[in-house]
Image (tube, grey):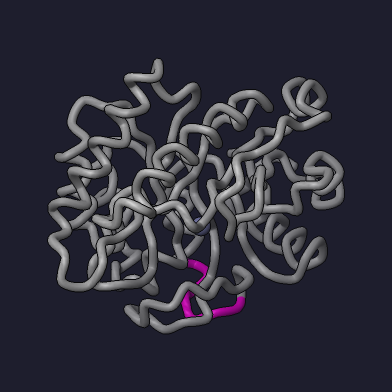
Amino acid sequence: MRIGAHVDPTDPLAEAAARQAEAVQFFLADPQGWKAPKPREDAERLRSADVDLYVHAPYVINVATLNNRIRIPSRKLLLAHATAAADVGARGLIVHGGHVNAGHDVAVGFDNWRKTFAYAADSGGFPLPVLIENTAGGDNACARHLDSLARLWDALGDHEVGFCLDTCHAYAGGEELLGLVDRVKAITGRIDLIHANNSKGAFNSGQDRHDNLTGGTIDPELLVAVIRAAGAPVIVETPGGVEGQTADIAFLRGQLGAAA
Ligand SMILES: [Zn+2]
């Protein structure tokens, strides 16, 4: 099981080395901005690295929304990030499930997801797996609760779609962690990546506040059980920089018996 961390994008391989990580996740552009990613000078070095790379799409992307001025640029930006992520040899592009605004029909949001994949298919398809991530909050989210996730997967039909399970988001979003992997896989058929995070917020609080693995409101043993059951690569998105994340990675290796 490959274990790593979300890191600063300046030199992801140095960040991986500092944490003894086998995988890293990073942004290719400002996560709160709409700018398309620039080509990276270290693309060749990243492509040939023996560290597994994952790219997280900007948070501003919301392909589900009924608001044209957000949805259309979101679609384009997602495809631009997919192209740039493939260029550095990333194994997947992680994007949040998104939501519709209050009073809007979430069914339209699911269909907007389908249109996003159809739009990409018209341009030759996404050049790497796109992993939709479950989110913690909101009443109109596409991937907070599993019943929504099931409707999303129904809407996406035959499109090739991956799934990233965030343990903090699931718990804070109100999904019991016990048996969660089986319930998710019954819907998606796959878990491509785990975002291993404890939660500062309480169960079903809707709060997206990550904590270190042995801190927070989730029993660390339960967290480990979910990660073990998923059997997927793991990225910690936890606080504390190199020190905090190195400790979280070491904790997981110890618990999972994974080779360093
Ligand atoms: Zn996450």
Residue 232: image x %, image y %? Answer: 49, 40
Does 42 sit left or right of 105 as displayed?
right
> In the image, which residues are magenta?
215-221
Question: Which one is in front, 118 or 151?
Answer: 118
Question: Which one is in front, 207 or 73?
Answer: 73
Q: Quadrant of the C terminus?
A: top right
Q: In which quarter of the image is the N terminus?
A: top right
Residue found 20% across the figure and 48% down from its top? 110
Residue 87: image x %, image y %? Answer: 65, 24
Q: Residue 62: within the magenta?
A: no
Question: Which one is in front, 218 or 88?
Answer: 88
Residue found 51% across the figure and 38% down from its top? 93
Does 108 sit left or right of 243 as displayed?
left
Does 17 sit left or right of 91 as displayed?
right
Q: Is residue 93 above or below residue 164?
A: above
Question: Which one is in front, 183 or 127?
Answer: 127
Residue found 69% across the figure and 55% down from its top? 249
Does 166 sit left or right of 40 as displayed?
left
- The secondary structure that most of the magenta stretch takes on is loop
Which residue in the rendered view is the most extreme toward the front? 69
Q: Is residue 199 above or below residue 32?
A: below
| Numbered marks: total | 0
Residue found 13% across the figure and 61% down from its top? 105
Residue 158: image x %, image y %? Answer: 21, 25
Q: Quadrant of residue 216?
A: bottom right
Residue 18: image x %, image y %? Answer: 86, 50
